[in-house]
Image: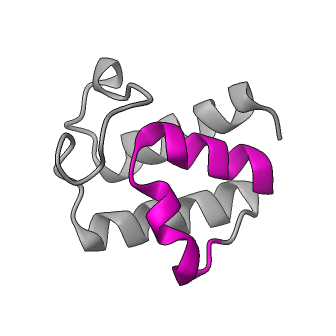
Amino acid sequence: MNMQEARAAVAAAFAQIAPDIEPSELTEDARLRQDLDIDSLDLLRLIQVIADTTGVNTPEDDYRQLATVGGFIRYVASHG
C-alpha cells in the first residue's frame, strides 16, 4: 500500500470513529491522545477499522508506533 492509500484509509477510519475531528486536524504530527483526544477505546476501534478495511493487523507491541497520525499512516503503508 502506498502512502496516499494509507492516508486515505486512516482518514476514513478517523471519520468513522471520531467524526467530530476536522480533517484539517489530521496533520502528520498530530498526537492521537494529546491533540485529538483519542482514548484507548477509540484507538482500539481505529485499529479494528483499519484491519477490517485494509487487512493490516496491528499487534499490541506495535501500538506505540501509532502515537501520531503520521505514525499511523506510515504503519499502514508499510504493512499493507
Q: Residue 20, how many percent across, how many down?
A: 19, 37
Magenta highlight on residue 76:
yes
Q: Can the viewer see residue 80?
A: no
- Range of magenta residues: 58-80
- In this rendered view, identify the residue nearer to me: 58 or 49: 58
As drawn, which residue projects farthest toward the top?
24
x%, y% of residue 4? Answer: 70, 25
User: Which residue is pictured at 17% across the width and 48% down the height?
Assistant: 34
The structure's colour scheme is one colour
Front residue of 22/35: it is: 35
Q: Main secondary structure of the magenta part?
A: helix
| Quadrant assignment, res 59 | bottom right
Above or below — where is 47 with respect to 36?
below
Residue 3, magenta (yes or no): no
Is 75 positioned to the left or the right of 15 in the image?
right
60 lies above or below 42: below
Q: Residue at x 40, y 72 (%)?
A: 44
Of the 4 image quadrants, the one containing the N terminus is top right
**For the point 59% across and 41% down, which residue is it?**
73
Q: Is residue 42 above or below residue 53?
A: below
> On the picture, is 11 further left or further right than 14?
right
Where residue 36 appears, as percent x and y from the top left, is: 21, 42
Count of numbered labels shown in the rendering = 0
**Residue 2, how many percent across, how many down?**
81, 33
User: Is residue 47 visible in the rendered structure shown here?
Assistant: yes
Q: Looking at the picture, does residue 39 appear above or below residue 33?
A: below
Farthest bottom residue in view = 60
